Image: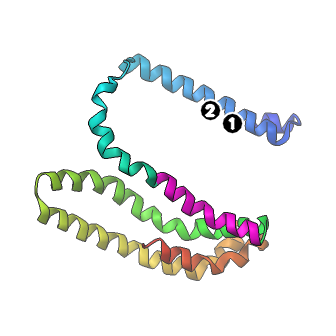
Amino acid sequence: MIAGLLLSGFGLLGAIIACLIVGSISFAIAFSLAISQIGFKIPAFSELKPYLRYGMPLTPNAMIIWIIHSSDRYIIGYFIGMAAVGVYSAAYAMGNLILFFLTPIMVILFPTISKLYEEKSIEEVRNYLKYSLKYFLIFAIPSAFGLSVLAKPLLRILTTPEFVSGSIVVPFVALGAFS
């Protein structure tokens, strides 16, 4: 659909419209399949209060992370320009590839550790944390080093020559991913 609208002369607007149409159709199909299989029930909001009490302190996390990830680009754009933001974003994305190893551990480990902590299995929690950190570091340290060394050739292959100057940022972002 994107190719058809682009070739018909609609340009970027056609590509956006095609994505919206395909996304809407996919959502409608998935929603109707879900409703047909599990039904629809209005939630009981009266039972929500105990969950909100524990979940509300975590709500600002997403906003704070968004501010951290956007503020550097905003400052670079303000002082240097939009071209520098593009170069920085490409290098930043490459340096953040290390999080590829951390995300599965976090997603799987958090519920397990929470359950074990509630069951007062503190020694087992320590064991899980110790080994998950070891496994993360086994992959992350060589990856950080490799990304730092290969940043220039990778940016040259994946982007245009203007982006290669951002390779100086990759080691710092890669090391920052450890924190």
Q: Where residue 19 appears, x then y in whole percent?
A: 69, 36
Q: Is residue 6 visible?
A: yes
Q: Residue at x 62, y 63 (%)?
A: 71
| Whether label 1 touches label 2, CB < 8 Å | yes
Where are the magenta residues, as a range? 62-79
Q: Residue at x 68, y 75 (%)?
A: 166
Residue 27 location in percent, x, y? 55, 28
Along the line of sight, the residue nearer the viewer: 61 or 85: 61
168 up-or-down from 72: above or below: below
Question: For this view, does 19 lie left or right of residue 65?
Answer: right
Q: Main secondary structure of the magenta part?
A: helix
Residue 123 is covered by the magenta coloring: no
Q: Nearer the viewer, residue 127 or 68?
A: 68
Q: Which residue is mark 1?
A: 19
| Picture coordinates of residue 15, whole percent (x, y) | 76, 39
Q: Is residue 134 left or right of residue 90?
A: left
Disc number for residue 23: 2
Q: Secondary structure at mark 2?
A: helix
